[in-house]
Amino acid sequence: MNGRLRAPSPALVISLLALFVALGGTSLAAVNLINGRQIEPHSLPKNRLTQAAIKTLHGARGPKGARGVQGLKGDQGDPGPTAASYAYGYLNAGPYSSYTTLLSLAGGSDQYGPGKITVDFAARVLAEANITMYGYTASTVPGDCYLNLIDSSGNATQMSQLVEFTQPAPGPPVGYTDVHVTGARDVPAGTYDVALICKADGSKTGQSFLNVVAAAQ
């Protein structure tokens, strides 16, 4: 019997080499695997997580918080400024050939006139007047009326359009006509008079009223 070892055949060498390569690749893959302890905290970006994992990260909605303390009550606003005044009187007998003040807030002959109107705010003054005029003498000349606003210095400003009317014819029965005049004017704070001024040719008389209201602009 020959005691020398016989050299391995080429087929055996190739088989052994293939076995070592296979075992070495598996070991290498096992070495490259990582576990959770090797991951640094807060190191994974969101796009590396599955949707299921992202969903589990959202905690449940907590209970509704208590209602906050009510805020302090604001200061009460100033009351809306408004003022009113009126006058009532009679048209004096004519004849008239020029414009005559028939009625005013401050007129001494007015039966119920309260005097001038005073406002302590920027206001719009609105006035309304109506005259029921009676005729005692004939006239073919039209009459007309308008409203004037007079400030505390006596400066007058026309605050209405000129309203023309046909003068009433005499009776019997006595003829009459109604004249209605309205006007408005924006004014600063102050004291004002409002006057109804008419021109009537011939002897006329009648009943008239004047209402004036001031409201904040």
Image (cartoon, rainbow, N blue to C red):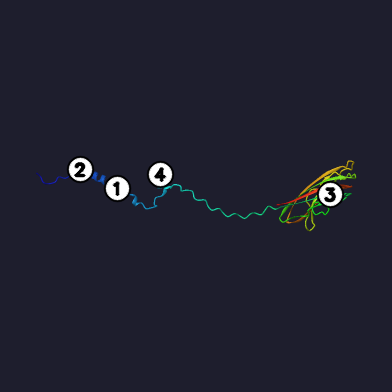
Compare marks 2 and 1 and give the one earlier in the sequence. 2
**Residue in the picture at 24% in, 44% down:** 19
- CB of mark 1 within 8 Å of CB of mark 4? no
Judging depth in this view, the residue of 14 and 59 nearest the camera is 59
Left or right for 188, reference 44:
right
Whole-number angstrom distance, CA of label 2 to CA of label 1: 27 Å
Compare marks 4 and 2 and give the one earlier in the sequence. 2
Please give the residue where the numbered disc 2 appears in the rendered image.
12
> x and y percent of residue 156 in the render?
80, 55
Whole-number angstrom distance, CA of label 4 to CA of label 2: 52 Å
Give amino acid for label 1.
Ala
- CB of mark 3 within 8 Å of CB of mark 4? no
Which of the two discs, 3 and 4, sits closer to the camera? Answer: 3
Give amino acid for label 4.
Ala
Which of the two discs, 2 and 1, sits closer to the camera? Answer: 1
From this viewpoint, which residue is outermost toward the front? 112
Give amino acid for label 3.
Tyr
Please give the residue where the numbered disc 1 appears in the rendered image.
30
Whole-number angstrom distance, CA of label 3 to CA of label 4: 95 Å
Which of the two discs, 2 and 3, sits closer to the camera? Answer: 3
Which of the two discs, 1 and 4, sits closer to the camera? Answer: 4
Compare marks 3 and 4 and give the one earlier in the sequence. 4
